Amino acid sequence: MKSGKNIFLKKWVAGNLVVYTGALGLFHPLIAHGFTGDHDRLLTTPQFIMHTLSLVVFVFLLVITRNKTFQLVEERKTLAGIWPFLIITPGVFWLGYYTLFIPFDILFMFLSIGLINAIQLKPLVKFPTKWVRQCILVYLLAAITGIVIGLGAHLLWYKDLQGIAKDLATWLSISSPAGLVVAYWVRSIFKKQLIMPEDYEAEMIPEQKVQLSKVA
């Protein structure tokens, strides 16, 4: 019989792979560029709105998937902790874009996700301070991996593609490797650090277990 932690870890990996590839790799370019077309560095108002909407859709799905996974660990509402993602992540994305330009928009976006997860999930791990450092590092390396592979592939193979095909190919090449890093590296951290309900039960003294069994 599979343990609760094994089920959690599989759900974490599957959820992240689907959201990063689907929401960031597919939905983002379709929403951001499919309706308003290509853009220069300065976006038009409709382009800015559609890009922001696509980022909101991405983090919205990311948070829902995360929370549904963590419902295996604790009672958690589906939209718990969503506001920092909806406000901060698009905000720092545009901060990076309009100050240092590409790829700092991608870098800042991933770092914001890592920082918010590091803070919000800290009560659920054994070594909170270590978790914060690990989590931020993972999302930093995920961003770097996606940037190097995705933008490298763009320069080598995709830059001459036309229309939405170029954007889809580029963002899939960014999001898929980055999603793999997040899914599997955080999985290895959770495997050692995550506190499951059975861990609490194992730490209870025998007298407490007897009392609980009588109450039940």
Image (spheres, rainbow, N blue to C red):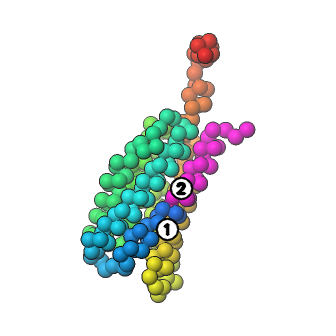
Residue 47 % position (x, y): 32, 72
Q: Which amino acid does label 2 sit on?
A: Asn
Q: Report the residue marked by disc 1.
A: 26
Residue in the image at 59% along x and 44% along y: 8
For the residue pair 123 and 51, the one nearer the viewer reads as 51
Which numbered disc flags the more N-terminal residue, 2 or 1?
A: 2
Residue in the image at 49% along x and 34% along y: 75
**Above-or-below relation of 187 to 103:** above
Look at the magenta stretch and give its main secondary structure.
helix
For the residue pair 60 and 17, the one nearer the viewer reads as 60
Q: Does the magenta stretch include residue 15?
A: yes
**Above-or-below relation of 55 to 71:** below
Q: What residue type is labelled 1?
A: Leu
161 to the left or right of 2? left
Residue segment shown in magenta: 1-20
Q: Is residue 204 magenta?
A: no
Query: Which numbered circle lies on residue 107?
Result: none
Query: Which numbered circle lies on residue 16?
Result: 2
Q: What element carries label 2?
A: helix
Furthest toward the bottom, the residue is: 160
**Above-or-below relation of 141 to 117:** below
Residue 193 % position (x, y): 54, 41
